[in-house]
Amino acid sequence: MFNPYGAKIMAKRKQMADTAPEAVPIPPLKQPSKLPNVLRFPTLVITSMFVSMAMYSFTSQFGAGDLAGVNRRLDEWWEIIGLLAWKATELGIGWWGEYDGHDLASLTMLSHMPYLYLLTTFYAVRPTTMWLGLFVDVASTYLPFTLLRDSSPVHRSEAKKYEVANRSILNDLNIKLYTSFLAAALYGIVIYGSFRSWLPGFLIVHFEGLKDLSGAYEAALPGVTTGFLISGYSAQNFLFMPALGAKPDAHDIQMAEFDPETATLSQTIWYNVWGYSKRSRTLIKRTVTLVLVSAMQTGLRTFITIKGVDLVGAAGWAAMWAIAATVVGSGFWWVGDVEGVSN
């Protein structure tokens, strides 16, 4: 269940303790590469940055004019090092977080889109330029990951039942469409609500050189939501599917055996703080990751690369997307809280 384990289900927990099967160990992600382990992550970083630079060099001829009056030159060494270090950090989060290429591609899509959405909506940058930028960012993470690490069971339709839970639901096209639409709608509601309230005035104060604010004043909720359909798919791919496919582990059995009458104070506190199922813990961890990565990526890139944006402005724009990601994660928590879906 996605809801916290409360007192009302303690009886169910005790019943689970009597009948719970042993946790099935999930095989680690296969490593298609034959490189030594110590070389894999450095190879990933170098390959990703090389692919990114090569693709941006090739596509720059299609969007250089759009960005010439918006992006500022990076003359300070700390600006360049900061962006490169953050790129390596993003890759590290995916690598040591046991993500596969699909996971990191979705995370990249969700965390890089807010910056490009800002350019398209308020700086008169063509949508084709935004989509080219997103394509390069996603491809430069997905391709190296695919070469160095196999897909996880959640993203393999032929995965065995012992590898992943709720296999039939994960393969259901209607479920994928419904959850994608839900995530798109939640993103749309948060962004549209910001357009209609605090955001226009905030942009005027903290963003010099804005080309057009009509994107906020003339926005309609259906149009805004439609613009987030691909983001909605990425959100369900990164948040909902891995959580739904998570198999119970030793932590679940330990929590099922929890007895408030004999537990120590520390055990009781731990039970109330982190006494969630594997599915809930997966969703929480991934939602927190999405919130933090989206906020850092959006804030850093907006502040460092766009002319006339102050630190408060970059932080405010990033915070809006962090809130949207939190709402989407909460929505998936609610959707997963249904009968008939195993933990």
Image: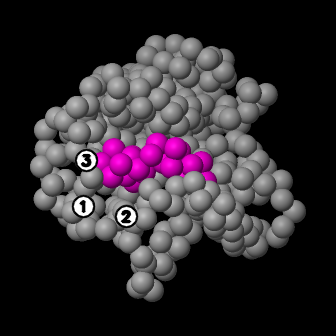
**Res 79 → quadrant:** bottom left
Q: Residue furthest right?
A: 34
CB under 8 Å between discs 3 and 2: no
Tag 1: amino acid: Gly
Specify whether 87 is left or right of 261.
right
Say which residue label 2 marks. Answer: 69
Coordinates of residue 234 in the picture (x, y in percent):
53, 37
Q: Residue furthest bottom?
A: 77
CB under 8 Å between discs 1 and 3: no
Tell me if residue 12 can be seen: no
Tag 3: amino acid: Asp
Instruction: Using the numbered discs, state the Cα–Cα distance from disc 1 to disc 3 in whole angstroms.
Output: 9 Å
Q: Nearer the viewer, residue 224 or 287?
A: 224
- 59 inside magenta stretch: no
In the rendering, which numbered label is found on residue 212? Answer: 3
Q: What is the magenta range?
A: 113-136
